[in-house]
Image (cartoon, grey):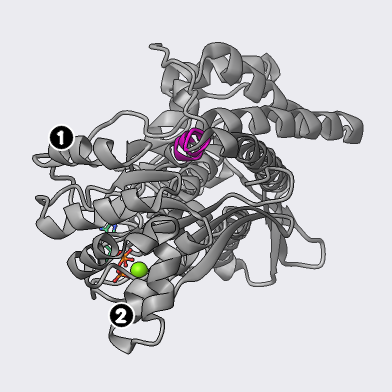
Amino acid sequence: MNPDTEIPTFAVVGHPNEGKSSVVATLSEDDAIRISDFPGETTVCSDYSVRVDDRILIRFLDTPGFQYPRETLEWMQQHPAADQHPARAFVDAFKKEAHRHHDVELMIPMAAGAGIIYVVDGSRPMRQNDLCEMEILRMMGNPRMALINPKDGEETFLQAWKDACAKSFNLTRTFNAHRASFSERMALFESLKRIHQDWEPAMVKAVEAFECDWKHRNRQAAQSISACLVQALELRTEARTEDRNGEETTRLELVQSYQDAVADLEKGVQSVLRRLYRHRAFQPSFSRQSVLREDLFTERTWRLLGLSRKQIIIAAAILGGGAGFKLDLLFANLSFGFFTLSTAALAAAGTWLRGEHMARVTVKRLRMGGVILSVGPNRNPQFPFVLLDRLLLYYELVINWAHARQDAPQARVQVEDEEKAGFSARWKRARRDRFARLFKRLRSGKETTRQEALQELQAELEALLWERSHGRDEPFEVS
Ligand SMILES: Nc1nc2c(ncn2[C@@H]2O[C@H](COP(=O)(O)OP(=O)(O)OP(=O)(O)O)[C@@H](O)[C@H]2O)c(=O)[nH]1
Ligand SMILES: [Mg+2]
């Protein structure tokens, strides 16, 4: 293979229903690939490439499963002329025989010199057919890796598989096509560099280009998250009513429309993240326990996300004494008013909504009669931390959601505990302080201050997303 001109190409082969298409979907970030319980789903060889800006970096070829491995092996052993190019000889001999269609189809890329990724379900015992398949692939002589995909997590047979694969393959890796996180996908790409010495330069280039593209995607994600935070902090909604008696209803409708507007901003980021990380079919329906199932303005969301009480006191101090947050009010009333629109909470809501700690409802009485009510901008110090935590949780879910998975995502689950489930409460003090200062500057009246803060926020977030995707989280800090 010429590393300057040729694209590393891997045929993903194996027994039917072992997870070949799943491996291809996850590695090529393509959630449109057909995956099913039904063995024999894939009937033709198809090319799914890893691309960056229309440039193909690596090709993965999905193939049908072996149909008659024992007969194929016997044929190869009985035809010594096939020694030089067993795959080519096999294709020539059987291409017109309909009942050998799958075996021919899977041999075609190997005949063309593709590398081999042999997928086995490591959670089941090994059978005679598997040994035949491994022997066929060994006879091919192409660079080859075995990928043990323990479908149901059972590990009893894992060692036996590893030992058997070590005899026939240059490399053996365990890789769960449905659970693999982004860093596990990257680790697999790294392993493919070592599949054959001659292929290494091309694989190094491909992995570098992919990392560069990832960085670019993270930058766009950071820009989208920053823009959402800025808009949420500036958000203000207004309503007018002539009817004195209808003031309370208008007030509630206004709060609702404020909350809807923040939710729309959040949904906008979620859609950008799905597009950037190539999830077209990803339609999350979160479990009851998931913190992402809740709306942003619920008591539970605010209890589980954002900073702890102690941390918010420090953050509020950064915002300056002038802000004068009455912390007891900030915490004691969290379950009322802004979060709940039930009738029972109305009385409490009245006081709370007029408070200076949430996005307060201000009332301007007009001389001609009637009032103008307005909500926002939100001054609560916890608000941007809660919102950011939600966006980061969504980011984490999307980047680590294997493209082969078709069931509903379960976000971080926190059922009964009182602990914080987001990220910001676990950051080191220095990072929390930096974000608190940035949020303060974003709330500043000065356009230049806001613009500078936005640039810095994007850079902070980009670094954060890189850490999160590469599993280099800051150590937790107890405070
Ligand atoms: N839980 C789990 N299920 C998996 C995994 N990999 C594959 N499956 C399931 O196994 C079944 C077969 O997966 P496919 O990826 O279609 O397998 P295949 O080898 O391409 O199958 P054929 O095209 O029929 O040969 C599907 O129901 C998948 O959802 C895995 O890592 N974990
Ligand atoms: Mg398939």
Rendering coords of residue 97 (x, y %): 34, 86
Nearest the eye: 167 or 381: 167
| Residue 100 disc label | 2
> What residue lies at 62% left-to-right and 35% top-to-bottom?
204
Kind of residue indicated by mark 2:
Arg
Nearest the eye: 478 or 130: 130
- In the rendered structure, the answer to whether residue 16 lies left or right of residue 380 reads left
Real-space Cα distance between discs 1 and 2? 32 Å
Q: Kindly indicate the quadrant of the structure image that contains residue 335.
A: top left
Q: Crowding at label 2, few (<14), some or many (≥20) Cα neighbours within 10 Å?
A: some
Rendering coords of residue 377 (x, y %): 69, 44
Nearest the eye: 239 or 174: 174
Rendering coords of residue 298 (x, y %): 41, 48
Rendering coords of residue 142 (x, y %): 45, 49
- In the rendered structure, the answer to whether residue 113 lies left or right of residue 440 reads left
**Residue range of the region highlighted in magenta in the rendering:** 187-195
> What residue lies at 48% left-to-right and 63% top-to-bottom?
111
Dominant SS type (magenta): helix
Q: Kindly indicate the quadrant of the structure image that contains residue 454.
A: top right
Q: Earlier in the sequence, mark 1 or mark 2?
A: 2
Question: At numbered mark 1, what does the secondary structure look like: helix, strand or loop?
Answer: helix
> Quick one: quadrant of the C terminus?
top left
| Residue 159 disc label | 1
Which label lies toward us, 1 or 2? 2
> What residue lies at 22% left-to-right and 71% top-to-bottom?
68
Q: Is residue 192 magenta?
A: yes
